[in-house]
């Protein structure tokens, strides 16, 4: 075995000692942060072992990592990133570890030339509000968050559980806190997903609340509850059904249209043309879950076709691998995708009876 070699680590307070190309020991200065990093009963290290097919064992504030050289480097980058997060006052749970692993693997997958240097440090997009900081957990989330920061109109499409709506609301809350916009406008088409809700009592807010509950949930996750209530009362946060957008020009606002696959073609065009000066518009939806009446084309599907080459519009398409909910959700999405993308079984054409003698072969 070669003599131990000290390798530069991206973390300010971590030291890596390599014993050979496939084995190194990573030591962290802060014992409390190291304990949080490894997880209760070393559950975070066990997750690294499962996902990267490596061996990771802790002793005090050090962890010994061995396995395939690419996988061990991915583990080191993930641990460095998570430790830096703990140093900055954040926390680490299993979903954060999953996200760091995905990003570390993606960083290597993007390197196609053998001469390219492997990244020493993970760089993930993040959205920060006073209440919460959200870090990208998949490469697509990273691309989406960067698009939300730079583009005036962003389409985020894909299956449920990928964070499309949650991250859109987080970005809107961040823009409001920065003073970059004066208000947030949240909208959804009021289309029932298979049920018949019938008459809903109450004022307009109470009538549309059932449709907009996911947007409320994300808002309360980003901002203190009392601040959300005051902002809604003052009209700084406006929650309205899509039909109420007609005739308006929405300036100095962060505007979100959720469940956009359930807009008609005319509704989508109407909504897109509401964009005013100094505004950001985010449109989210899943083209595979359209609840419109049979024969009615989704406005989202049409917009994705028509606006594909329009300058200033960003498109981010999530896939089942980007699902960040329970791992079973990703498997469910893949199973449904497989079912509905299978080609129809071949059916032989029906045999036609030969015309009888004396009968004409052509219809009158």
Image: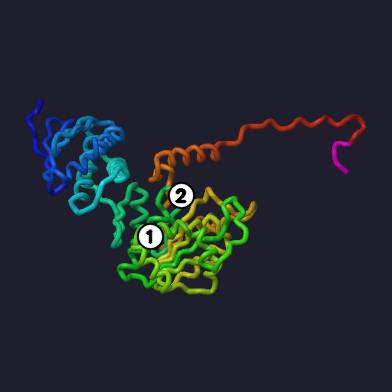
Q: Position of residue 318 (x, y in %)?
A: 42, 48
**SS at mark 1?**
helix
Which residue corresponds to mark 1? 220
In this view, 156 is above or below 180: above
Q: Is residue 111 visible in the rendered structure shown here?
A: no
Examine the structure image and report whether residue 363 is included in the region drawn in magenta.
Answer: yes
Q: Which residues are magenta?
A: 360-364
151 over 124 or under it: above or below: below
| Mark 2 secondary-structure assignment | loop
Pinpoint residue 288: horizontal percent, then vertical percent.
53, 48
Any part of residue 337 in sight: yes
Q: Give the residue number, with chain letter if any, for mark 2.
A: 158
Decide whether residue 347 is among the magenta residues: no
Q: Residue furthest right?
A: 358
Tell me if mark 1 has few (under 14), some (14-19) or many (20+) residues whose alpha carbon lies within 10 angstroms of its own. Answer: some
| Residue reaching furthest to the top | 1
Between 229 and 222, the one nearer to me in the picture: 229
Q: Whole-Å distance between the Cαs marked 2 and 1?
A: 24 Å
Asked if the residue at tag 1 contacts the one at tag 2, i.e. Cβ–Cβ closer than 8 Å, the answer is: no
Measuring from the top left, give residue 81's x and y in whole percent: 22, 47
Q: Is residue 192 left or right of residue 132?
A: right
Crowding at mark 2 (Cα within 10 Å: few <14, some 14-19, many 20+): many
Q: Nearer the viewer, residue 162 or 43?
A: 43
Residue 295: image location, x then y, percent: 64, 53
Does residue 216 appear left or right of residue 264 in this picture?
Answer: left
Please give the label number shown on residue 268.
none
């Amino acid at each position: 075995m070669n003599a131990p070699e000290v390798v530069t680590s991206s973390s300010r307070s971590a030291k890596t000692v390599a014993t050979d190309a496939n084995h190194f020991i990573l030591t962290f200065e802060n014992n409390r942060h190291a304990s949080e990093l490894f997880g209760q009963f070393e559950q975070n290290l066990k997750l690294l072992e499962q996902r990267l097919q490596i061996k990771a064992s802790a002793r005090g504030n050090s962890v010994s990592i061995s396995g395939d050289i690419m996988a061990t480097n991915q583990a080191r980058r993930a641990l460095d990133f998570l430790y830096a997060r703990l140093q900055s006052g954040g926390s680490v749970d299993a979903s954060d570890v999953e996200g760091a692993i995905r990003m570390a693997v993606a960083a290597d997958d993007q390197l196609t030339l053998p001469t390219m240097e492997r990244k020493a440090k993970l760089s993930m997009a993040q959205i920060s509000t006073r209440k919460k900081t959200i870090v990208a957990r998949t490469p697509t989330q990273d691309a989406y968050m960067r698009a939300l920061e730079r583009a005036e109109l962003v389409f985020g499409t894909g299956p449920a559980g990928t964070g499309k709506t949650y991250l859109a609301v987080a970005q809107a809350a961040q823009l409001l806190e920065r003073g970059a916009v004066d208000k947030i406008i949240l909208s959804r088409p009021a289309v029932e997903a298979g049920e018949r809700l019938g008459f809903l009592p109450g004022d307009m807010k109470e009538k549309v609340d059932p449709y907009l509950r996911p947007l409320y949930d994300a808002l309360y996750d980003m901002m203190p509850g009392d601040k959300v209530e005051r902002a809604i009362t003052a009209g700084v946060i406006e929650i309205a059904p899509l039909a109420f957008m007609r005739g308006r020009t929405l300036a100095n606002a962060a505007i979100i249209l959720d469940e956009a696959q359930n807009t008609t073609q005319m509704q989508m065009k109407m909504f897109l043309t509401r964009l005013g000066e100094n505004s950001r518009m985010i449109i989210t939806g899943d083209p595979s879950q359209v609840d419109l009446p049979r024969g009615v084309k989704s406005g989202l599907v049409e917009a994705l076709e028509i606006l594909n080459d329009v300058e200033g519009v960003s498109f981010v398409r999530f896939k089942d691998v980007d699902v960040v909910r329970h791992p079973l959700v990703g498997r469910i999405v893949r199973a449904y995708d497989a079912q509905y993308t299978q080609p129809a079984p071949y059916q032989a054409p029906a045999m036609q009876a030969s015309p009888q003698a004396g009968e004409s072969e052509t219809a009158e």
